[in-house]
Amino acid sequence: MTNVATSTESSASLAVSYKLGGVSPLTTKLTFNATINVNGANAVFRFNSTALNGTASGFALYKLFNTNGTSRPYKAYATSADTATDGAWWITYANNTYIPASTSLTKGTNYYINFCIKDNGDYDEDRTLGSLRDPVILGLGGSGSSSLSGCMLNPEAGFGWEWGLVAGLPVLWRVRQGRRMTARGTR
């Protein structure tokens, strides 16, 4: 790794600068610059924090794009230490032991946030082969944090009762409209 830099930008400023919406940044902006020997290979970066409180899956890692002032969440919290998937991220104890998603984290304990980037992949802002640039923040809220984002459907899960509700809404609306039309016609 050639360079790691932190930002003194406030949470409010980060939210505006990178269009973070409802995300509450828990860390400063961390920028990792690295050169790798194998073009197109994956690299794993990590940073530590003692400020995490809540379940591991309650946090979300966000990629910040300096080139266009946008952001995007990394993939869902990894089910294991995943060094092969671009956009995978997970938390470990100081001894590098993977922390499962449902594990409660305690403020004051040193944890490491790990994430995987593929050279010239979706999370690599530097399009030069062999060179990686990755500004990130860890946050709460927004679309990347499943425990705080409210009601949502998982399109990759099978067809459950949730999809039935969604499919049934137009039918209920149509029935209601039909009743209104009937009521108006009998006056």
Image: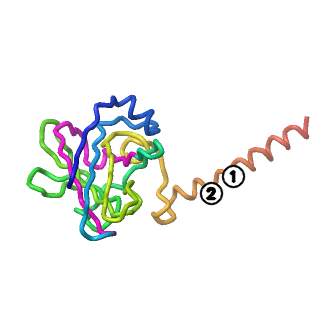
> Residue 53, position in %: x, y?
22, 38
Given contact means CB atoms under 8 Å apart, are the residues at marks 1 and 2 in contact? Answer: yes
- Give the residue number, with chain letter if any, for mark 1: 170
Q: Quadrant of the N terminus?
A: bottom left
Counting other residues with Cα less than 10 Å from the Cα at mark 2, is it few (<14), some (14-19), or many (20 or more)?
few
Badge 1 marks a residue whose secondary structure is helix
Using the image as rendered, state which of residue 136 and residue 76 is in the foreground: 136
- Give the residue number, with chain letter if any, for mark 2: 167
- Residue at x 28%, y 31% (from the top left corner): 8
Q: Amino acid at mark 2?
A: Ala
> Residue 38, position in %: x, y?
27, 71
Counting other residues with Cα less than 10 Å from the Cα at mark 1, is it few (<14), some (14-19), or many (20 or more)?
few
Q: In the rendered view, does 182 fall on the left or right side of 82? A: right
- Residue at x 62%, y 57% (from the top left corner): 167
The residue range painted magenta reads 40-64
> Residue 88, position in %: x, y?
31, 59
> Residue 134, position in %: x, y?
32, 51
- Residue at x 31%, y 69% (from the top left corner): 39
Using the image as rendered, state which of residue 97 and residue 117 is in the foreground: 117
